[in-house]
Image (cartoon, helix red, strand yellow):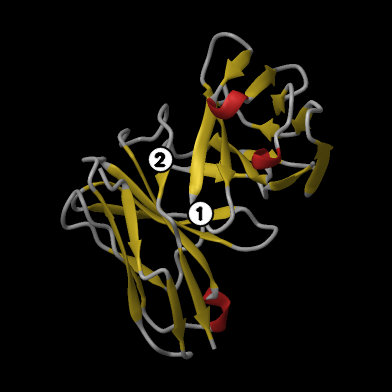
Amino acid sequence: NAGVTQTPKFQVLKTGQSMTLQCAQDMNHEYMSWYRQDPGMGLRLIHYSVGAGITDQGEVPNGYNVSRSTTEDFPLRLLSAAPSQTSVYFCASSPDPKRRLYEQYFGPGTRLTVT
Amino acid sequence: AQSVAQPEDQVNVAEGNPLTVKCTYSVSGNPYLFWYVQYPNRGLQFLLKYITGDNLVKGSYGFEAEFNKSQTSFHLKKPSALVSDSALYFCAVRDYSSASKIIFGSGTRLSIRP
């Protein structure tokens, strides 16, 4: 299994541009999520999904959209990039839809810079 | 509100010495607690979890964590540190307001000197 994969690894955007960060997993996990990691702030949840067709907001959803058309894929869309969205983005998945008991599996991350 | 605190931004330990990375939590019910490790330029990796049962939880790479309900702590420990243990460590707790969310601490950077 490849586990959780993310593309691209690095991206530079100009303010106002849009883009999609890709995330895929081949473990048939129901639960998928997106986090952003900023220095001194740990990881903050952006959006999550407990199954295909179901998404919900996390702690910091503004400026981001998600969709979950298949179990495998969970793309994150930046609608109009802002410098405040400069961060490292991690996608994660878990076999437990409510993620009560099981650990999450993380992708390698996407480092995004918005100028 | 549920939260976890990691009071130390950095912990420095000599190789071969025991290490402790501290974590305290605040939850309204029984806590589900986790430790993750992040190596440079990598995603987080699961180390161990506490759900219920024995207060001493054993995990990957020789790490263990001690759950202490009276002190609301879940400190990560290892009897003998390795240089390869140098990484960023995150404590996390399940959010009771939504079972689908997990709350991460701010992280502690562990540095093991040879």
Drawn side of residue B5 relative to residue A33, left or right: right
Residue A18 location, quadrant: bottom left
Which structural element holds mark 2? Answer: loop
In the image, B92: left or right of B24? left
Note whether B69 is above or below B17 in the view shown. Answer: above
Q: Residue under mark 2: which chain is it in? A: B
The quarter of the picture where the N terminus of chain B appears is top right
Q: Residue at x 52, y 79 (%)?
A: A113
The image quadrant that residue A91 belongs to is bottom left
Residue A82 visible, this orientation: yes
Q: Amino acid at mark 1?
A: Arg
How far across and down, in percent of the image, does residue B60 sit?
A: 53, 27
Q: Residues within 10 Å of mark 2 (few under 14, many from 20)?
A: many
Q: Give the amino acid at mark 2.
A: Ser
Between the C-alphas of marks 1 and 2, the distance is 24 Å
Q: Looking at the image, is B84 positioned above or below residue A85? A: above
Q: Percent from the top left, x then y, of residue B79?
A: 74, 21
Question: What residue is disc 2 on?
Answer: B100
Disc 1 marks which residue? B42
